[in-house]
Image (cartoon, helix red, strand yellow):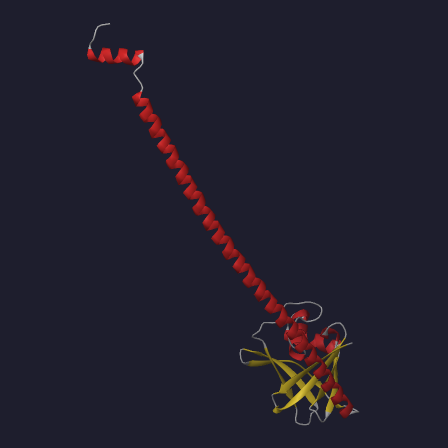
Amino acid sequence: MSGEVRQIAVATDPRIPYFLRVDFAGNLGAGFALALSDGISAWNGEVSEDEVRRKANEMEVPMESFVEDLHQALIGGGRARGGGRRARDVDIYSFELTLDRRQFSYHKICGGVPVHLGSLKLQPAPHPSALTRELIGQSLKRNSHLMKENSLLSEENRKLKEDHAHILQELEHQVQDKETMTRDLYARFVLVLNEKKAKIRSLQDALSQLPPTASVQKKQRDQQGEPF
């Protein structure tokens, strides 16, 4: 059996914080047991697998989706055991408790309208003080675990930010190096090109200073009309 403890507010008595524990095997679709305490008194109740299936059929929703809503309503957060999609952040769930503390019900708020997910009859716990201490102890232990987990995540997030900043700095250096290399290569290309142009002009000047060859002289005479 898996036991999950959380603190909830009851819509019919919002001033008093309640501790809720849900015990189940596998997933909530197989049925579950519930313990509830207001810090002084405590109650127990159970929901069978048949009751869960009957409610899902009554609502005309797939069993998997209904179990997921139960998980979100009674346990909160995360993914329902056994699979299924993650509930949307906009999903809101509420709880009600009769004045005689004999019936506990849970709802999903859809568009401001409460949709009844289920209810169960409560029985006074035989040892309410012991159960209350157990629930509070489990809640404190869970809170301590979450604080430790949050601290680890914060440290991991800090390291990720440092790595990100380091990578950005390296990228900036690489971009600067690439730009410098591009400028150097372009300057060298221009220098080599100018040197080649100067060499070509020098060769052209040297070529123009050479005496004309016999064929060139003949062509010149032909153009001037001179006899052979």
Q: Which residue is located at x 54 percent, y 57 percent? A: 170
Up-down: is 149 above or below 168? below
Can you name the residue that lies furthest to the top here?
A: 228
Can you name the residue that lies furthest to the right here?
A: 126
Task: Please state the total of marks drawn on the protein image.
Answer: 0
Side (left or right) of 194 relative to 182: left
Q: Quadrant of residue 105?
A: bottom right
Up-down: is 220 above or below 91? above
Spot occupied by residue 21 in the image (x, y as percentages of width and height): 72, 82
Spot occupied by residue 203 in the image (x, y as percentages of width and height): 35, 26
Side (left or right) of 133 relative to 93: right
Spot occupied by residue 102 in the image (x, y as percentages of width and height): 70, 91
Spot occupied by residue 141 in the image (x, y as percentages of width and height): 72, 81
Up-down: is 104 above or below 222? below
- Front residue of 37 and 158: 158
Q: Which residue is located at x 31 percent, y 12 percent? A: 215
Can you name the residue that lies furthest to the left here?
A: 225
Side (left or right) of 82 relative to 180: right
